[in-house]
Amino acid sequence: MNVEIISIGDELLIGQVVNTNASWLAAKCKEWGFITTKIITVADKPEAIKKVIFEASNNADIAIITGGLGPTKDDITKGVLCEVFNTELNLNEEVLNHIKTIFSRRNLQLSELNRKQAELPVGAKILHNELGTAPGMVFQKENFTLISLPGVPFEMKNIVEKQLKQFIFEKFNFLPVISETVMICGIPESFLAEKLEDWETNLKIKKLSLAYLPQPGIIRLRITAETNSINGKESINKSIDELKIVIPEYLFAIGDTAMEKVVGDLLKNQKKTLSTAESCTGGYIAHLITSVAGSSSYFKGSVIAYDNSVKTEILSVSAEDIQNHGAVSEEVVRQMAKNVRTLIKTDFSIAVSGIAGPDGGTEEKPVGTVWIAVSSENNTISKRFQFTNDRERNIIRASVSALDLLRKLILM
């Protein structure tokens, strides 16, 4: 099945909002075995919306639209769809009662604009939105199916998982694509490709394909079987077992799992605790750790030692060492790691100090220089990293690298 994904909204076209919906839906279509042939963003203008729908109806089996279903005057998608599918709006009592319940829980008075969200196109299949006021809708015309979803990401995703997925299974005799993701950290993409050259050649013999999906500090390897069969799944599993032998030090998870979740599970399973001392990352490591549900059982706290006075006065780092070696040094970061672990009374700790950029570098320590240390009662490991001159990417890469270094220490 060929799919076109259409995102509606002026805010997307001017860069005010990042279009995460399209990439998420494209990944979901891949999972369902569909082929996404086009992703397009269109303004909140009736003629523009009608044009892309008309083109999609001629070129694709399915169009998935997000956006334009809110209560304001610029939300025009329903009216346009009524014109396209030659129907009209009618009050849906079930949806109206759901909207009333939402407003009642929030102690808000129902407005006429929100009441109009319960007016839905006659003949459309309604996809219940348990998290919001705008339901999804499915329209069918001959061999063309159009799916309209709200633009709010968490509402859209909930409808897809709990409503649309079942519809897709039943209508299109769904056969999922068999694939698995392997998470890699600590090696550049080109170096990884060289190490995996022979392994990747064997994948082709097994009728498996490989995709490199890099992001700051992480490379996701997605292995996909050409056939939807038990043999395809077995081939993937065997190939992953072989991969563990080729790059054991870089592979940190099977499945699309974040580093902070992997580290958190290790700490939770061992009933150990963690603290952090952060300089150049400014609390981003603590943010990643606490983004995982249940992290309160192992994460106790952090010291954001951005200024040297915090390093010396709170973390008891030697002022002489800072003077002699600099704040970005192995001597300083090791003290930060050991002392924050003692200060907050945890089993493990992470410390980071670096030059995030874009300025502040020297010939000896250019922008992107980061020292990371991880510590336990019996061991402290420190390592220098050299990243780029991009501040945001340096912060992310330093944080991921620090978590990976901690992961290795826990497993020792």
Image (cartoon, rainbow, N blue to C red):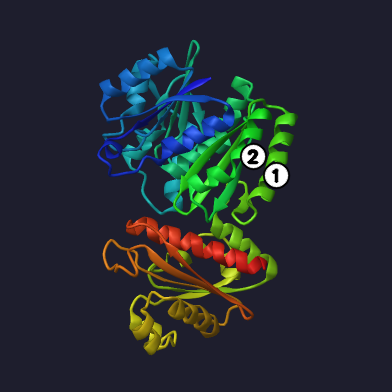
Q: Are marks 2 and 1 in contact (CB under 8 Å)?
A: yes
Q: Read off the residue under disc 1.
A: 242
Point out the residue furthest to the top here.
142
Q: Amino acid at mark 2?
A: Trp
For mark 2, give the secondary structure. helix
Left or right: residue 253 compared with residue 90? right
Residue at left offset 61%, top offset 77%: 379
Q: Is residue 220 above or below residue 376?
A: above
Q: Which residue is mark 2?
A: 199
Front-lying residue, 231 or 268: 231
Q: Is 50 above or below relative to 298?
A: above
Image-based side of 180 in relation to 382, left or right: right
Q: Position of residue 108 (x, y in %)?
A: 38, 51
Residue 288 visible from this viewpoint: no
In the rendered image, residue 242, in percent from the top left (x then y), is placed at 70, 44
Q: Is residue 11 left or right of residue 343?
A: left
How many marks can you see? 2
